[in-house]
Structure formats: structure tokens, C-alpha cells
Image (cartoon, helix red, strand yellow):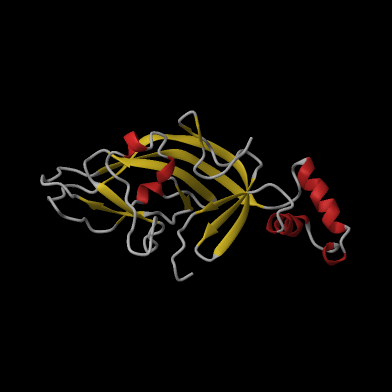
Amino acid sequence: MELYPYKSTNGFMEPVALQNHLVAIHFVKDIIYRRVVFFEAITPTQVINLGALGAGITSNRTNVTNLDCYDQEFGQFRWYCLDNAQIRVFTPRGVAKGDLKTLQAVIPPNIGAINPDLSLTELYVWQDNRPAIEAINGGGVALAAVRMVAMGFRYRTEELGNPVTYEEARVIAQLKQEQNYASKQPAELLTIAIQQNRISCTHVWASGMGAGR
């Protein structure tokens, strides 16, 4: 089973990792190597209401605190707006998502018709580093509410330790035969194996990457 971000099969959202799978969470300038120990689905739920928004108005940038995850957890979410507004997304608050040289892409109000599986809206949240949004009312009529609905998966993770799978044990044994790695602990060897692409690992981006990085 192939696991990677933005994947959909037959129009459905899929988890990006399963129990015992290794993940590399990219957040700002850090890469956090973890193992998934539990995951569960989050059904479609309203996560924020920005309230009324006048015609031609852009809302203030607002944190979506309801997408916060517990310590040592990350979330995989897709979402859409229930109302006739375009949505700019920031992951986290100061980093624009969909940032082009002269334009920041938005989630249009008809995203469900254009992209029924919502794969183009997918984002990741590491712990409580929640995203933020701005709503744009480009129409000629004021909106009574701007409501966002999110769904996806939450993953509890732990630090790398001893190998769990046969593949991990085999790679660690191979690394220990190499002179530079003989004295290293299993967790260090698993990290090296991921960095050298010797073992399967799903990479997820819990923050954007600006042009200046």
C-alpha cells in the first residue's frame, strides 16, 4: 500500500500513514522523525465560523484553534467552506499556503465540484501549530457567516526506538556493519536510514515553505 500526501482512491480520502509506520514531519526548519502508534478518522465537522462578512471585504486572519492536536500528535485534514467565500490558508499563521510569486491561491467556494475528494485542500498540523485563514467575499452580497468544515485523520506518534518491523531490523543490522555506525543506538540508525532513503517513511509538511527559504 502506497502512502503519500494528497492521495485519493475512488474519490475518498486516505490516511497518510498506518500504525507502526514511520513519518518525517517537516515543520518550519525542523524535521521530526516519529512512529505512528494510533490513528483515527475525524468526520466532517465545522471547525470555525468567521461570522458575517460584507460584500467585497476580506476578513482578518484568524487562527483555526479547533484543528489543534495534542502533544506528540499530528493531523491530516481536508476542508471546504459552507458559504460563498474564497479562503486563503496559512500554515501556520505566518506562512502562506499556495504561495506563488505574484499570487496566493485560494480555496474557492465550489471546491467540492472542482475537486470532489478535496485533495487539493489537504494540510497537516503538528501538535498545536494550527493553521490560520482569511475569507474573501468577492460577491455583491453580504454573507451572514463564513463556516469551514474539516475532516481527516489524527495520528498519535512516539519517538523512534527499537525496530518494530523486519525491514527495520534488517536495515539496522546492515548499518551496524558499517564502520561509522557500529556504536550508534537503534533510534539513531533508524533516523539515518530514513535520511539515506534506505527505509520506507512518509514525509508530511506541517508548514509551508516561503520563497526565501
Q: Is residue 43 above or below residue 139?
A: above
Q: Position of residue 34 (x, y in %)?
A: 62, 52
Along the line of sight, which residue is nearer the eye, 170 or 186? 170
Q: Which one is nearer the viewer's eye here, 75 or 56?
A: 56
| Relative image position of residue 209 (x, y in whole percent) | 46, 62
* Snapshot quadrant of residue 117: top left
Q: How many marks?
A: 0
Q: Residue at x 58, y 39 (%)?
A: 38
Q: Quadrant of residue 25?
A: bottom right
Front-most of 28 and 96? Answer: 96
Is 26 on the left or on the right of 197, as rendered? Answer: left
Where does residue 59 sit, x and y in percent of width and height?
A: 21, 55
Q: Identify which residue is drawn at 65% across, 43% down.
A: 21
**Looking at the picture, how far across and down is residue 55, in whole percent?**
12, 50
- The reply, left or right, for residue 111 in relation to residue 170 is left
Q: Specify the quadrant that holds the N terminus.
A: top right
Say whether residue 106 is left or right of residue 145: right
Q: Residue furthest top?
A: 10
Q: Quadrant of residue 152?
A: top left
| Farthest residue, direction bottom | 212
Outermost residue toward the front?
102
